[in-house]
Amino acid sequence: MNAEIQAIIEILTRPPGHQPWPVAIDTWFTGCDQSELTTLLDALLTLEPPLPTDPEEENWGRLFEHIMQRQRADVSGDLPLSHPPAEKLAELYEYLGPASKVRHLLLMILAYRADESNINTMVTLLIESPPVEVSGFAVALSPFLQRDTEWSLLFPKLFQALPHPVAASAILDLSNYLTRQGKVDQHPATALVDQLEQLLKGVVHQLASIEDGSIMKTTIDLSPEDIASQVNEGIALATALCDAMALIGNQDKTSALFQAMDLAHRRIQAEAAAALVRLENDAGKQRLGGLAEEASIRLRVLAYAEELNILADIDPQFQTAQARAEGALALHLAEPHIMGLPPTRIELLDCSERLWPGFDDSQTCYLFKYEYALGGEPYENIGIGAPEVLSAATDLTGLSMDDLYAYFAGLIVSHPDIFEMPAEQLDSQADVNAKKLTQQLLESGYTEISPVTYGFFFEYQVLAATACRGEQFGVLAIDNQDILWLPHTSVNRPLTADDAYHIYKGRKLFASFEGREA
């Protein structure tokens, strides 16, 4: 075993934070002989495989990504992909075990090769021992979105994996893609249309039981996380099934689509309605027209209406730039990592023509005030729907209109001469200047100053901090010319020092724009 392989083995047995991945090993993957990749896999099979809870598994995943990069390079150089052989990749896949969260990358390597032996191996593993997560299945099939193969190697055999909860949506998404791109003469699941219809009815029933709460009576000990996971998986599968039913084109198979349109979930309603339009059923057109009123689904409805040539059937008031900006913000807020659901109410706060970072010409900007009424005190805040789509965790309702625009502009501006660092990690020169700015604040009457961020904005150096002025707590940003002071106006979600820094950057940007116009 050569020194580089031995070094890789040593890295794999240590937590990622305990030893960096040497550049020399990264380079080794580029220049090693193909047969050495097989030697490497043989060495891996002698190790104790990591558990998903082990930090070492991250190193294994990184290793597989390096092998994948080498495969791509060899294909670009017209080299045959004979190492590691398919059976060796399959052996390591099984060796890592069904709980592994990185072994799906080995399936991606097999899929990327796109030949009969490797695809047969990959398909067998997907059917008999699928990845543990939905995303793993999708990653395993992702090479087929870029590389063609003999599609009969995949279908219909791959449909045997449909019963696996993690498999169905990814398989159907791929078959839908191949059909839409004209890579196959007909949808690969055409002969399975009855099975797909029953599967869609089952998904609709499951989601309906979640909506009305009856699932809690039939399934014990379901946590909120379990329910959220079932909803997300159900939405993905229902979307893929609706698309498949439309692409198969059997106009007699619409009962499950009508059931899907009866769900409360607007996304699935839109998917089912669009599928019915494709199947030349006017009920779908009527439902899409009604869904355009719902801000969070509006952009998807308009996209489908344009694709299906039925924009004339959508109320023009929902096609305006303002309506689209409102829809963009509502969709953003509904993302799981933002608020998780669309706002109860959303209304236009301001519309202005402004120069905006990233654009040469002035842009129409839309600010919206939105509210969530979920019991108790309503949750209110302000977001921007165009030219950017942004919201904030802190309460922005106390800001002036100009500072709202400054906040969002400062939040997204990007330039090599604009950067920042934590105030406790400054080099000696920056630390000296930060102390000077702090002293300036003390002389100006500020107390309880706590530096948070030190920023570089072109020729300016700025300190963002929390502080107190008189009896009022707040946040500020100070450079060698001015102090931006923002008193706290919200008890539960007060502005942070970084919020002040964003407003500072936005103000400077807009001032420079005004100078340019003059």
Image (cartoon, rainbow, N blue to C red):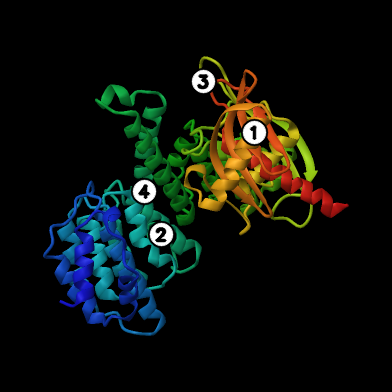
Rendered view: 399 above or below 270: above
User: For the residues marked 3 and 4, what is the alpha-carbon distance in whole angstroms?
Assistant: 37 Å
Select label 4 or label 1 by which is in front.
1
Tag 1 residue: 441
Numbered marks: total: 4
Select label 1 or label 2 by which is in front.
1
User: For the residues marked 4 and 2, what is the alpha-carbon distance in whole angstroms?
Assistant: 15 Å
User: For the residues marked 4 and 1, what is the alpha-carbon distance in whole angstroms?
Assistant: 68 Å
Tag 3 residue: 374
Res 107 visible = no
Q: Secondary structure at mark 4?
A: helix
> Given contact means CB atoms under 8 Å apart, are the residues at marks 4 and 1 in contact?
no
Q: Residue furthest right?
A: 518
Q: Is residue 213 left or right of residue 357?
A: left
Q: Secondary structure at mark 3?
A: loop
Select label 4 or label 2 by which is in front.
2
User: For the residues marked 1 and 2, what is the alpha-carbon distance in whole angstroms?
Assistant: 60 Å
Name which residue type carries label 3.
Answer: Leu
Please name whichever residue, 474 or 436, is drawn nearer the observer in this view of the structure.
436
Name which residue type carries label 2.
Answer: Leu
Tag 4 residue: 196
Which quadrant: the N terminus?
bottom left
Tag 2 residue: 174
Q: Residue at x 38, y 77 (%)?
A: 73
The earlier-in-sequence mark between 3 and 4 is 4
